[in-house]
Amino acid sequence: MSKKASGHLAALVTILIRGTIFIYTKVLLVDFEPVEILFFRFILGFLALLIVYPHRMRDLLLTCSIFLKRYPDIHLHII
């Protein structure tokens, strides 16, 4: 597959995913809070990046764990 064709395919997949997200969000708002939907979207995005770029994400996780060990008083809060 040529670079141009693979670029068009990637754009088409992106358009389909982003277009359906709005529909699913409207349906999910019946049962979930907006913050919960955002949380699950971030988790799914993280998992997708972990599949596509496993080495970069592993380095990021290692950096985060070193940072949190160095500064144990930092707490993550959901507002």
Image (spheres, rainbow, N blue to C red):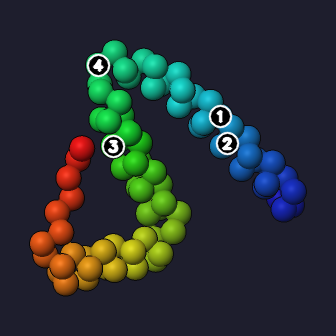
Query: Which amino acid type corresponds to the residue marked 2 in the rendered image?
Result: Val
Q: CA distance from mark 4 to mark 2?
A: 27 Å
Residue located beneath label 2 in the image:
13
The C terminus: image quadrant: top left
Residue on which disc 3 sits: 39
Residue in view at x 46 percent, y 19 percent: 26
Where's residue 5, x and y in %? 84, 53
N-term mark: 3 or 4: 4
Mark-to-mark CA distance, 1 and 3 = 21 Å
Q: Position of residue 14 (x, y in %)?
A: 66, 43
Inspect the image, locate mark 4, and give the three-letter code of the amino acid beneath it. Asp
Q: Which mark is residue 16?
A: 1
Q: Residues within 10 Å of mark 1 (few under 14, many from 20)?
A: few
Residue indicated by mark 4: 31
Q: Position of residue 3 (x, y in %)?
A: 84, 62
Q: Nearer the viewer, mark 3 or mark 2?
A: 3
